[in-house]
């Protein structure tokens, strides 16, 4: 056996990147979440080759102070929490301070950032964990991150990537979910520049986002739902005539965060049970909101399946809201048919 020794930071980052950065879509997720945490009202995502050779995320959020840019790329550096207790009241999407360090460990990353209050911004280039360029430049307020040559220094991981079209599909899916989850943000998503394939207005109207993602036809087959209370639920659910062969159209967001939850899934399907053929699934875009204090969400950075303490209350609220809406609409429909 060789000597036991501490790994150097570059190696640690490279290994750790394996946990957070699985594919281009994981990078887009981290960068878009950072943009949201920075209070952006517009976010643009542009990719080439499924994000493998190039991806860019631009936001108009808070930006990073010139003297903090390098720090942001260090492992476990975050502005979002200061101590473990802060986790109990956390409202940001990130807090681990791992994303930028991990991405920079396995790709070439260029950041342009400027705070609105600063005259000039900063351009910082870091490649495979090694800083290359740090300079003052003129740039718009907000932050742009360009990520190129993903996994150039970890060929084994690069081999596990799918074809660009398949990688692009993951990113499209993610951007659609983000757009549905954040009607207050204008999302623009492009492949190789040019005309966006997804563009939402950011006017806080979920309807516009559903239209942008699913189109007019689908929107016309959805019922809008709005329930207030300790747990508020609003959004859209499909009329029983509109079903899908799998669950991928069941979207729900908990306090704006896209999640997967078997508890919510069950509540939805239970409510639809008497209306749809077994093995078919509804289309839903539901925003569930409740006091984050009682939520206690346990989130792993790469996992969307979450567990939370108020699961039973949420299950009941979703079941009740959806059941009621379906009953109402069923009643209206039968009144139309029977004169
Ligand atoms: P985390 O999001 O967990 O804090 P990251 O590695 O993703 O960790 O980012 C590190 C820090 O860099 C963040 O805490 C934030 O202060 C800053 N940062 C990253 N992206 C942006 C952005 N788009 N706009 C403003 N600040 C950012
Ligand atoms: Mg982050």
Image (cartoon, helix red, strand yellow):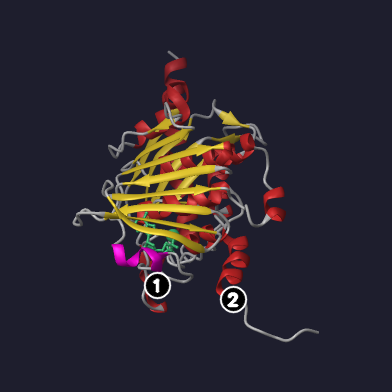
Task: State if disc 2 and disc 1 touch (CB < 8 Å).
Answer: no
**Label 1 vs label 2: CA separation?**
32 Å
Identify the residue position indicated by label 1 in the image. Answer: 88
| Side (left or right) of 7 relative to 127 | right
> How many residues crowd mark 2 within 10 Å: few (<14), some (14–19), many (20+)?
few
Residue located 34% across and 57% down the image: 135
> Can you tell which mark lies on residue 67?
none
SS for callout 2: loop
Bounds of the magenta segment: 66-72
**Residue 191, placed above or below residue 185:** above
Give x and y (percent) for residue 248.
58, 39
Give x and y (percent) for residue 269.
57, 43
Does the magenta run of residues contain 247?
A: no
> Can you tell which mark lies on residue 8?
2
**Residue 108, placed above or below residue 241:** below
Give x and y (percent) for residue 148.
53, 47
Quarter of the rendering occupied by the N terminus: bottom right
What is the residue that sits farthest to the top in this orientation?
A: 339
Does the magenta run of residues contain 67?
A: yes
What is the residue that sits farthest to the bottom in this orientation?
A: 3
């Amino acid at each position: 056996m060789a000597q036991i020794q501490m790994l150097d930071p570059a190696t640690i980052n490279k290994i750790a990147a394996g946990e957070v950065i699985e594919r281009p879509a994981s990078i887009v997720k981290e960068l878009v979440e950072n943009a949201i945490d920075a209070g952006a009202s517009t976010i643009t995502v542009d990719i080439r080759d499924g994000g493998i050779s190039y991806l860019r995320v631009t936001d108009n959020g808070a930006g990073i102070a010139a003297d903090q840019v390098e720090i942001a790329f260090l492992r476990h550096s975050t502005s979002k929490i200061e101590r473990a207790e802060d986790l109990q009241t956390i409202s940001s999407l990130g807090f681990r301070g791992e994303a930028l360090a991990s991405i920079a460990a396995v790709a070439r990353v260029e950041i342009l950032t400027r705070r609105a209050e600063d005259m000039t911004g900063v351009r910082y280039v870091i490649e495979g964990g090694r800083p290359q360029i740090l300079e003052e430049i003129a740039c718009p307020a907000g932050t742009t991150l360009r990520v190129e040559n993903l996994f150039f220094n970890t060929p084994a991981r690069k081999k596990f990537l799918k074809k660009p079209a398949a990688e692009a599909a993951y990113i499209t899916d993610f951007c659609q979910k983000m757009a549905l989850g954040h009607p207050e943000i204008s999302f623009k998503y492009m492949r190789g520049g040019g005309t966006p394939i997804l563009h939402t207005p950011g006017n806080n109207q979920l309807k516009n986002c559903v239209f942008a993602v699913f189109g007019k036809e689908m929107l016309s087959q959805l019922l809008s739902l709005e329930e207030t209370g300790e747990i508020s639920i609003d959004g859209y659910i499909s009329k029983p005539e509109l079903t899908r062969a799998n669950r991928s159209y069941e979207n729900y967001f908990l306090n704006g965060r896209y999640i997967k939850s078997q508890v919510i899934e069950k509540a939805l399907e239970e409510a639809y049970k008497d209306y749809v053929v077994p093995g078919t699934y509804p289309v839903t875009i539901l925003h569930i909101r409740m006091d984050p204090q009682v939520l206690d969400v346990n989130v792993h950075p790469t996992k969307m399946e979450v567990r939370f303490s108020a699961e039973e209350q949420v299950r009941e609220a979703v079941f009740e809201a959806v059941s009621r809406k379906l009953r109402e609409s069923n009643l209206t429909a039968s009144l139309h048919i029977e004169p």
